[in-house]
Image: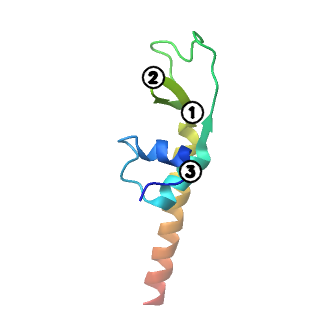
Amino acid sequence: MAPKDPKLALLGSIPLFARLGARELQRLGELFDQVDVPAGKVLMRQGQTGGEMFVVAGGRLAGIISIGDVVKARIEQVEREAEEMRAYIAAT
């Protein structure tokens, strides 16, 4: 079932994110900033290191996701899962 939130529907339509579950897609949506950028504005130059992922829909910039925020969220998720595993092992 497609998300009702247009922002989440957009993110879910991107092949990179298409396999995410509803909870992960919701979390990604929290990291997604919709932006309006004037035509012709340079967002990054060839060879420049970027810290964001640009989301383009219909040939237009739809928003930006901070790569640092995504990595931080994933680390937090892995740490929670590791703690749950430690608790499970300790209980058995």
- Image location of residue 57, percent across then percent down: 46, 30
The residue that mark 2 highlights is 59
> SS for tag 1?
strand
Task: Give, as a three-letter code, the residue at label 2.
Answer: Gly
Residue sitting at 48 percent across and 85 percent down?
A: 90
Viewer-nearest of labels 1 and 3?
A: 3
The residue that mark 3 highlights is 5
- Image location of residue 76, percent across then percent down: 56, 57
Residue sitting at 41 percent across and 46 percent down?
A: 17
- Image location of residue 56, percent across then percent down: 47, 28
Is 76 located above or below residue 14 in the figure? Answer: below
The mark nearer the N terminus, 2 or 1, is 2
Dot 1, crowdedness within 10 Å: few (<14), some or many (≥20)? some
Task: Give, as a three-letter code, the residue at label 1.
Answer: Ile
Residue sitting at 54 percent across and 55 percent down?
A: 26
Q: Decide if residue 61 is in sight here.
A: yes
Is 43 located above or below residue 30 in the figure? Answer: above
Residue sitting at 45 percent across and 22 percent down?
A: 59
Position of residue 22 in the picture relative to residue 16 (left or right): right
| Distance in Å between CA atoms under marks 2 and 1 | 14 Å
Viewer-nearest of labels 2 and 1?
A: 2
| Distance in Å between CA atoms under marks 2 and 3 | 20 Å
Front-lying residue, 38 or 87 = 38
The mark nearer the N terminus, 1 or 3, is 3
| Distance in Å between CA atoms under marks 1 and 3 | 17 Å
The residue that mark 1 highlights is 64
Task: Give, as a three-letter code, the residue at label 3.
Answer: Asp
> SS for tag 3?
loop
> SS for tag 2?
loop
